[in-house]
Image: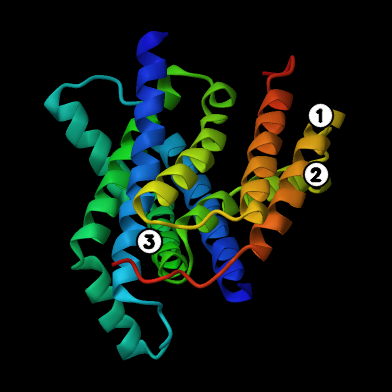
């Protein structure tokens, strides 16, 4: 049980970290504005050759593998509420490391979404499993 | 904000479709019975020959590209929780298309997530360049 919980937290942290790194890389690249095929290809190449994006995508892939292991051990309904934890973790890390400003409206949104996801998860743990 | 929200929705749909295809494919391949080298080769060969797996991988690639576009426009504290739209879609689809009973607790959860998403979506602002 302790092992499952530890792996679960690792998975959540990897997912959050992967998104933070990817965002850092993509913000350096600048917003995608040109949707012409050649420009898209050039942008995609620039994205996958950015070390932050590469690291972020690699960590998210690693997280996907860890998640598969978690799912083979734990009930889905038991493991999924961790998504709600991830929203909070991402917001915290984005604030600390990327300097994103969390205004009241965004904080309220993240809070409601997280509580809502937890309720949905609780409802899945009924008699039908 | 509308473009970013639309891309979040598209990426969530692609991700969900990808997972369903991969699951369908892996059902066809069956469980990994042993870790013997030959069994492993057969397992991955079966997976690589399964059309559902390939369709799933295509959806996952589309998901990744759409997600990169979202993260090029938006702050990550906005984009990641926006993924919760999946819970609303799954809940509503299960109720309307599969006739699955959705209890009061789950409707409450879906309602909270929806209001949260509404607040969140409105809090979008162009991501500032990281130093």
Q: CA gap, disc 3 to disc 2?
A: 31 Å
For label 3, the residue is B61
Q: Residue at x 69, y 54 (%)?
A: B117
The subunit carrying tag 1 is B
Q: Residues within 10 Å of mark 1 (few under 14, many from 20)?
A: some
Q: Residues within 10 Å of mark 2 (few under 14, many from 20)?
A: some
**On the picture, is B109 further left or further right than B4?**
right
| Image: B2 above or below B71 | below
Q: CA gap, disc 2 to disc 1?
A: 10 Å
Q: Quadrant of residue B128?
A: bottom left
| Image: B72 above or below A114 | below
**On the picture, is B130 further left or further right than B78?**
left
Marked residue nearer the N-terminal end (3 or 2) = 3
| Residue B105: image tag | 1
Q: Residue at x 27, y 60 (%)?
A: A53
For label 2, the residue is B111
Q: CA gap, disc 1 to disc 3?
A: 35 Å
**Of the pair A112 and B59, the residue shown nearer to us:** A112
């Amino acid at each position: 049980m302790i092992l499952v919980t530890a792996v679960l937290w690792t998975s959540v942290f990897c997912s959050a970290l992967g998104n933070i790194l990817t965002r850092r890389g993509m913000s350096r690249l600048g917003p995608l504005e040109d949707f012409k095929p050649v420009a898209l290809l050039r942008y995609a190449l620039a994205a996958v050759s950015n070390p932050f994006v590469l690291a972020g995508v690699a960590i998210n892939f690693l997280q996907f593998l860890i998640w598969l292991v978690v799912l083979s051990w734990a009930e889905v309904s038991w493991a999924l509420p961790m998504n709600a934890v991830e929203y909070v973790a991402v917001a915290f890390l984005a604030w600390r490391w990327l300097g994103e400003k969390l205004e009241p409206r965004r904080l309220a949104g993240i809070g409601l979404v997280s509580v809502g996801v937890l309720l949905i998860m609780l409802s899945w743990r009924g008699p039908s499993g | 904000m509308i473009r970013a929200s639309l891309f979040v929705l598209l990426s969530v749909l692609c991700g969900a479709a990808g997972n369903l295809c991969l699951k369908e494919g892996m059902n066809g391949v069956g469980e990994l019975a042993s870790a013997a080298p030959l069994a492993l080769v057969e397992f991955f060969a079966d997976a690589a020959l399964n059309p559902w797996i390939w369709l799933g991988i295509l959806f996952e690639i589309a998901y990744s590209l759409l997600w990169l576009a979202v993260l090029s426009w938006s702050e990550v504290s906005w984009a990641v929780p926006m993924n919760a739209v999946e819970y609303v879609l799954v809940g509503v689809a299960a109720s309307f298309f599969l006739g699955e009973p959705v209890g009061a607790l789950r409707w409450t959860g879906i309602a909270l997530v929806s209001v949260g998403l509404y607040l969140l979506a409105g809090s979008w602002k162009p991501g500032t360049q990281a130093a």
